[in-house]
Image (tube, rainbow, N blue to C red):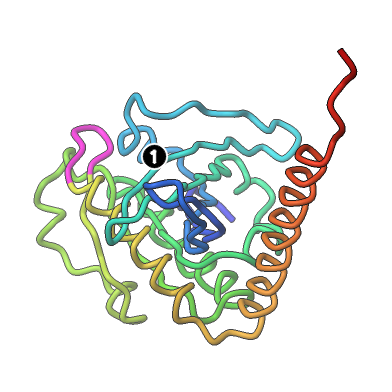
């Protein structure tokens, strides 16, 4: 597959509320291919990338607010994965939203959208997907063009610029909200299985914390 159509996928997992008094299980993570630095523009100075070189991944963490609740978001940047012609299935199985970005100055990235979209739908047929036209700062007239790919699949289309920041914050905020909403309302069997596993893991952690607390309170005092 020639070119570098950017591919970004959200994976909602768990987070704490703003008050810290509970757990809200709709916090999105983001798996992403982002050679055009959209994530850096969105996060600006508020991120600390962690390179996972074995898998050609970079992890970014972000704290967002959705409906008054704080959600912790992981951004997985898979830049460089395009050389493998496809994404590993494990990158998709928890995804709850997707951003597909193309460079308005490179036609091949637009043409590649179809291939990546087909692969996405093979593993995640129902998750929300957004199409993004990047680098509009280079040619503002591009915002007047009609891109058939988004219309063909009834997908929302955003015009953005990683260089000057146009629409970048809105894009990611909207995508995070879509990811959270999808997870809250999903009836997909795989989502239900993953939710049960997540609930089990959370319950186990709560039980372990309670056991540890009880052991601490019942421990006999040391002799003076």
Which is more toward the observer, 196 or 46? Answer: 196
Q: Which residue is mark 1?
A: 39
Give the left or right position of residue 209, taking residue 36 as reference.
Answer: right
Which is more toward the observer, 214 or 34? Answer: 214
Residue located 78% across and 37% down the image: 216
Q: Would you say residue 165 sits in the magenta stretch?
A: yes
Q: Quadrant of residue 152?
A: bottom left
Residue sitting farthest toward the front: 224
Residue sitting farthest toward the right: 223
Locate the N terminus and report the quarter of the image it occupies: bottom right
Residue located 48% across and 75% down the image: 127
Could you tell me what secondary structure mostly forms the magenta stretch?
loop
Q: Percent x, y for residue 49?
A: 53, 28
Which stretch did the figure color magenta? 161-166
**Looking at the image, is 33 positioned above or below residue 184?**
above
Residue located 46% across and 51% down the image: 21
Q: Quadrant of residue 92?
A: bottom right
Q: Quadrant of residue 113?
A: bottom left
**Looking at the image, is 83 positioned above or below residue 26?**
above
Q: Percent x, y for residue 23?
A: 51, 57
Q: Percent x, y for residue 4?
A: 49, 47
Mark 1 neighbour class, 10 Å CA radius: few under 14, some 14 to 19, many 20 or more: many
Give the left or right position of residue 139, taking residue 154 as reference.
Answer: left
């Amino acid at each position: 597959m020639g070119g570098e159509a950017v591919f970004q996928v959200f994976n909602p997992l768990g987070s704490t509320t703003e008050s810290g008094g509970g757990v809200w299980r709709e916090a999105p993570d983001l798996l992403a291919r982002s050679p055009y630095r959209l994530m850096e523009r969105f996060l600006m100075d508020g991120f600390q990338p962690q390179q996972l070189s074995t898998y050609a991944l970079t992890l970014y963490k972000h704290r967002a607010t959705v409906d008054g609740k704080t959600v912790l978001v992981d951004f997985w940047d898979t830049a460089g994965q395009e050389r493998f012609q496809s994404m590993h299935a494990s990158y998709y199985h928890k995804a709850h939203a997707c951003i597909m970005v193309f460079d308005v100055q490179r036609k091949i990235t637009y043409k590649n959208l179809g291939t990546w979209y087909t692969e996405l739908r093979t593993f995640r047929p129902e998750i929300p997907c957004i199409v993004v036209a990047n680098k509009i700062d280079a040619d503002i007239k591009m915002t007047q063009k009609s891109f058939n790919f988004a219309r063909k699949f009834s997908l929302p289309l955003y015009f953005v610029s990683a260089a000057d920041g146009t629409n970048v914050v809105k894009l990611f905020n909207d995508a995070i909200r879509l990811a959270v909403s999808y997870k809250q309302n999903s009836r997909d069997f795989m989502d239900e299985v993953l939710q049960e596993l997540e609930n089990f893991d959370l319950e186990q952690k709560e039980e372990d914390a309670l056991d540890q607390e009880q052991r601490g309170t019942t421990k006999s005092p040391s002799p003076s």
